[in-house]
Image: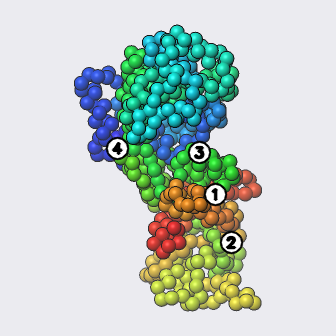
Amino acid sequence: MTDTSTSNANESPRPSKHFIEQAIDADLAAGKIKGVHTRFPPEPNGYLHIGHAKSICLNFGLAQAYGGTCNLRFDDTNPSKEETEYVESIQDDVRWLGFQWDSLHYASDYFDQLYQWAEKLVLDGLAYVCDLDAEQTRAYRGTLTEPGKNSPHRDRSPQENLELLRQMKTGEFPDGSHTLRAKIDMASPNLNLRDPVMYRIMRAHHHRTGDAWCIYPMYDWAHGQSDSIEGITYSICTLEFENHRPLYDWYCQSLEIHHPRQIEFARLNMTYTVMSKRKLLQLVKENHVNGWDDPRMPTISGLRRRGYTPESIRGFVTDVGVAKFNSTIDVVRLENAVREHLNRVAERRMVVMDPIKLTITNWPAGEVEMVDAINNPEDESAGVRQIPFSGSLLISQDDFQEDAPRKFFRLKKGGAVRLRSGYIIDCHDVVKDDDGNVIEILCTYDPETKSGQDNSGRKVKGTIHWVSAQQAVPVTVRNYDRLFAVENPDRVEEGKTFLDHLNPDSLSVTQAFAEPEIKSATAGDRFQFERLGYYVVDADSSESELVVNRIVPLRDSWGKMVAKGKAN
């Protein structure tokens, strides 16, 4: 076994095993486990982002690599923030990434069992009902350098605690008035072991259990026990849960139940990106973006709408690898992953933005010739398409200069270029408006220089793209860029928030003109617009308007911008 991601010809295998695989191998060799059973346990309080993709690929990938199983389990223990919409979106994202869970579960499936176990800990003298409010609980907890002090209610008898817990469950106390806490060690150097809260009173409608419960388990109490119930062998968590592992272990050991092994790995942090669900929710709620699937968002649904492929994201995750120490990954690596994949699989189309008219003065009047264009030079099986060529074309304004410098190898007055898939043309004149602006370029074509049939011996240094004006299809182009203008939007600056780092140029909308073949495209189709970048047809498209989103430019332009001080 060399790779924990799904097997795909477009994804590079890793040559060696990471530390989690090494730990699994050791456990298998020692007979500690008979097989691998993992789970991906998101809380349904928002849409998944690229950081979650790493956890998805790791958990499902380990199960696949070892011939094991992987569950999808929703940690739905905080109903005030959870919605069915998020449950459905998470399932869509996991499937889209190329994975299918072996079993679907919810933490709420186990509410009855969790409560029974809570009563057991109470009767065993290992849990108690506390009357301290949230502020008092924090004050009693102590600090990293000072031990906490015992709650005045810590020494209640098991029977008294059991009665109070049952009263909590039946709704006899107001919200926030009581909690159930584990009785561990208020002097522990690990703050998570200082009598952590197991249940709180919260009257909130649950998306699955309705109003059946008014007490809800805390994450640390529900998480490990849910793993145990499902027979999970490895609880794969990010590094922020490392200090929670002793509590995870304490609960399983105290209940004498199946005890999964928790292993932590470094979460995915990325430049020019925020990963906090709270901040992503703020972006959505305050309309800084157009919803969770805005193509500028790092959510999986946003990346999907942006045009990223599941293969490119899995390849990116494999490239990043699995480590024990947190680091920040350059977003260019993600962008390059989709470039590399789409370069292999995306068909090419010619699209002109910011057009200027080009007239071939020696072209037969009214004649339209169909020329062959290669769909993808990286994939011979993609074949060719035919494009109309005529005497009236559109080219990009950037591809012409009347008085060009010596090293300008595109079209200039008195110069020549090749029209991709067409002919060599020579510019002999221009037409200007009253203000002296060039509005039309006049050229002749060399009929002996047709692409694929050129025996003329002529050599030109430049090749540009074009579309036939009469057959051109209007396209609305959304050129998306990075949502933030600085590498670390989370950095703390006096008087500023992450919102102050939003990139004002993260979206520009323009009209372009495409070859007529584009009319057959449907939502989700991806193309390389030659010499421009990679684009995807957006779901907003209709019969009357084709809308495309830029996935990434052909090359990274931010490196140069940062070097010049324009992007930071």
Residue drawn at 44 percent across, 57 percent down: 330
Which residue type carries mark 2? Ala
Q: What kind of element bears circle 2?
A: loop
Furthest residue toward left: 30
Q: Which mark is residue 278?
A: 3
Left or right? Give the position of 52 relative to 78.
left
Distance, label 4 to label 1, CA atoms, is: 40 Å
Q: What kind of element bears circle 1?
A: strand
* Residue 377 seen in the figure: yes
The mark lying in front, picked from 1 and 2, is 1
Left or right? Give the position of 289 relative to 8.
right
Distance, label 3 to label 1, CA atoms, is: 29 Å
* Residue 373 seen in the figure: no
Q: Which mark is residue 373?
A: none
The residue pinned by badge 1 equals 548
The residue pinned by badge 2 equals 469
Q: Earlier in the sequence, mark 3 or mark 1?
A: 3
The residue pinned by badge 4 equals 324
Q: Earlier in the sequence, mark 4 or mark 1?
A: 4
Q: Is residue 57 above or below residue 284?
A: above
